[in-house]
Amino acid sequence: MAAVIRRCLAAAAAVGAMGSTGCEQRAREVQSEAELKQAVQQMIPAVERATRLRFRQRPVVLRRSRAQVRDYVIHKFDDDLPPAELAGAQAAYRLFGLIPDSLDLRRTMVDLLTEQVAGYFDPDSNALYIPTDIDPSQARLVISHELVHALQHQYLNLDSLVELKRQNDRRSAAQAILEGQATLAQILVLMPEQKIESLPNFWELRTALGGQQDQMKVFGSAPLWLRESLIFPYLGGAEFVRWFDHEYPGKQPYGVLMPISTEQILHPARYAAGDRPDALAFESPARDTVRYEDGLGEFEIRLLLQQHLGDDGAAASLAAGWDGDRYQVLGQESGAGAGAGAGAGAETLVWYTLWDDKTAAARFRKGLESAWAKRWLGRRGVRRAEIKQLLVVGVPVVRLVDAPLGWKGWKRVPTIRVTRAAR
């Protein structure tokens, strides 16, 4: 889901992150249309040097009003999440407690992205769009970032990455590569004398960036999951790409080298070791309608635990050792009369997580039990939750079922099939 959201972004969080490196101070003001086009042409050679790629076709640059930016955000969001998909995803994230039951996901995301987008590259038109209300001192920051996306599009099918259906974690990893590479290149373009290896850990900059973003009303009031998901591809991705450039000089993190999980982004050593998540699929047919199905991945599991436990460090430790996950949302759509306190109406959540070993599974199970005990405050007598540690074809598994008390599926919980990844 996080990657679905980020498809609408082109350059939001990167501007704030780069302020700490001095990029903003270096960026000359760009105010007129002529200055804008001149800045693009002047930056193209620097972007090519920073990425070690050459433009096959130069993008056009156009201005857009904030109202037009909002229209674009709405179009892309609705294209990625048609009504049925959106309803299922919203129900899932409500059941996990990552968004409040009262939050309208579409409205919040449209407002958030309209507020945050400082510019975007549209692959369909090969155009770089700059809002007319952008701060002139930020224009060059945005242009340098978006030119990288324009260049990536000529070597990657960006649409094929974002059109991976029900593969949330894989899409999140791909988005981290795209935004991370653009963030690094942005520094090299605006500060060519800067040594990338001398910069601080990008991921650790998120607290400072979050503080800057809090000055924006919609972002400041957004749930933890939305705020962190907005920042992760830029900073988490930049840290991984910096590591990749050092370990694989002269290569691009594209194609078969593209990371396939946020675990690999968060733990580059696991990427280098070829640690791939095991595949799992629901096997037995559910008694109820399957409204939605996807996975969270290590990064969103961290956010889930942080949300309910309030401890970032503990959440990272508990999520370590992830080896794959999949969930289903079962039952009717939520709505009037769906049941007070049900969280997402009469829906049921069945979630399987795979772990590297029994120790990691046991650690996560205990952490999830603590998190769900807090999640359950005020819901007893309405729903039932069950967390079990299992073993499926030798793979340690933790299963969470959260359902209405009267759910008939308790006697036959959906099962999964696990396919071990090559080791």
Image: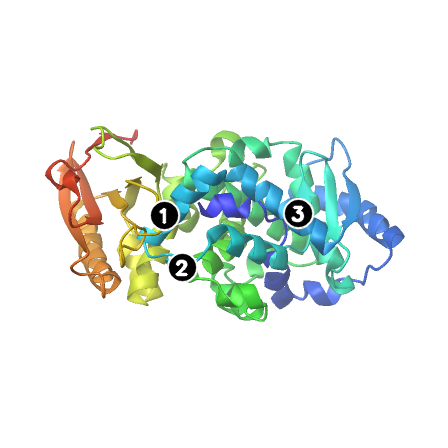
Mark 1 — residue? 91
Residue extending farthest right:
34
> Residue drawn 46% across and 48% down?
2
Q: Position of residue 139 (x, y in %)?
A: 75, 57
Task: Mark 2 or mark 1: name the one nearer the start of the chain.
Answer: 1
The three-letter code of the residue at mark 3 reads Asp
Q: Nearer the viewer, residue 301 or 412?
A: 412
With 322 as the anchor, is 8 left or right in this view? right
SS class, disc 1: helix
Mark 3 — residue? 71
Task: Mark 3 or mark 2: name the one nearer the start of the chain.
Answer: 3
The C terminus, quarter of image = top left
Mark 2 — residue? 102
Residue extending farthest left:
411
> Residue drawn 62% across and 47% down?
73
Q: CA distance from mark 3 to mark 1?
A: 25 Å
Relative to 344, residue 218 above or below? below
Q: CA distance from mark 2 to mark 1?
A: 11 Å
> Residue drawn 77% across and 44% down?
44
With 222 as the anchor, is 280 left or right in this view? left
